[in-house]
Amino acid sequence: MADAGFVEYHVVLACRHSATFVNDKQELFMWLLENPLPEDWEEQQRKEQEAAAAAEVASAGGGDGAAAVGSKRVRYRRIPLRLRELFARMEYEAVDALSTEALTTSFGWRENHVGGQHDVTELNRLLFDALHRSLAATSGASLVDRLYCGTIVNRLWCLGCDKKRDRDEAFHDLVLPLHPTLELALESYVRPAFLSGREQYACDECASAGKGKQDAYIGGSIKASAPVLTFNLQRLGMNYETNRRVKHSDVLAFPLELDITPFCTEAVLERTRREHELRTSSDGTPMVVEGEARGSSGGGGRAGGGGCDQKGGKRGGKKGGKNKKKRELIASHISEGARERGMVYELLSVVVHAGNPYGGHYYSISRDRFNDLAGMESVEENIARSTLGGSWFMCNDSKVTPVEEWSLAGEYGGKSSHCAYMLIYVRAGARAELAAERREPSAAVMREIEQRNEEVRREREEWARENA
């Protein structure tokens, strides 16, 4: 009917008038022609949407829902409600798996969207944006930023006048090029580019002093970090010769604990100063410093091919073999005093992509930090114990199984089709900080969960009697 020029609300009114119109398009069309929309239909539709949104917020126990009603946030409000409800059901319902249909419906997805391939990085950003919009003007307005938002400082350092120009930029995740280890990827990310020769910087201050263009350093570093750090690895790229997408499975080893001190602003500035001192010899002749000898101009490779050249050829880390033997996890390098300064992060989850650049499957290996299975009788569950506390689980569609910690090394990459795609770290000692954000499910949701658990219990008892 939209093709015929009828608005959706007009069709809704028709179907309210007669349910037979749902299956009789000819009668529906005639009714729409004979009964034009009322002049105040837009106001009437808005009131109905507000009432529906308010009822949904109230049923889910959302105390701040009224702030979202009457604005564009109405359509976003369903997302945090469905997400909160799903998490509650995952924790309290006595079932092996749950449907995510209510959540994906809140995204506006239809059945054909659910079956399509979606990039987990893009989905993560869209979800954060939707949550931020929906929680605006509520007590949870800063929730996403409190947990995930850090600050990158982009610095331009003119060597002619020694002036530094800084620009702060917020981030919720960092996109890293591929290198043999996560530390090397971060080092590449924060390494400043040296602007010289034809790329010299036109500094206003130097120009006012009668000087020409000057050598300069430009790059970014971590100024402030959030309780949760998310790293997206540049696994997917484009081969511009064949005009085909490619997936880079180069090895990138990640530690259980990560010290971010070397990648923060002060440490990066100090390294840049030392590099500048070594860059020029005593007679003023420029020297090639480490990194440039490999053809790198620095700058962290932010616009680069993620550890791969433009032709799609792989370079970087040593490839892993096909064997399934136990791999060793790489060691963590923690500097003195880093824990006290809140610079140490613990691995929380690894999102893995299995497949090719045109399609595939995501699963994760995640650590339950709040429920340690130590002491349980099941040997299978005890193997999941983490040296960081808690237990490791592989979450693969409807199957959640405990896994050994060393199995994380199997996702470093190599020749297999599955490799780490996203890494999530949480600040060591942030358990209380994160627990403070926890909210208990609403009474209405808990009643539904209890009813569902009672139905499951009866079904299991009935099955046990029939199969005794």
Image (cartoon, rainbow, N blue to C red):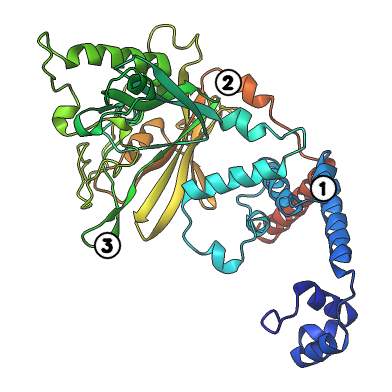
Estimate the x, y position of residue 260 in percent, counting from the top left.
41, 20
What's the CA distance linking mark 3 and mark 2? 45 Å
Q: Secondary structure at mark 3?
A: loop
**In the drawing, does residue 273 fall left or right of residue 256?**
left
What's the CA distance linking mark 3 and mark 1? 48 Å
Q: Residue at x 78, y 83 (%)?
A: 22
Crowd tier of the residue under label 1, counting other residues whose Cα lies within 10 Å: few below 14, some 14–19, many 20 or above: many
Position of residue 302 relative to residue 155, above or below, is below
Q: Residue at x 84, y 49 (%)?
A: 59
Which quadrant of the rendered structure holds the N terminus?
A: bottom right
Residue type, label 1: Val
Residue type, label 3: Asn
- Kindly indicate whether the residue at mark 2 contacts the one at mark 3 (C-beta within 8 angstroms): no
Q: Which mark is residue 57?
A: 1
Q: Secondary structure at mark 1?
A: helix
Which quadrant of the rendered structure holds the C terminus?
A: bottom right
Camera-side mark, 3 or 2: 3
Position of residue 286 relative to residue 354, above or below, is above
Q: Nearer the viewer, residue 323 or 462?
A: 323
Camera-side mark, 2 or 1: 1
Estimate the x, y position of residue 370 in percent, counting from the top left.
60, 27
Q: Nearer the viewer, residue 117 or 346?
A: 117
Q: Is residue 4 visible?
A: yes
Q: What residue sits right under mark 3 in the picture?
A: 243
Q: What residue sits right under mark 2 in the picture?
A: 430
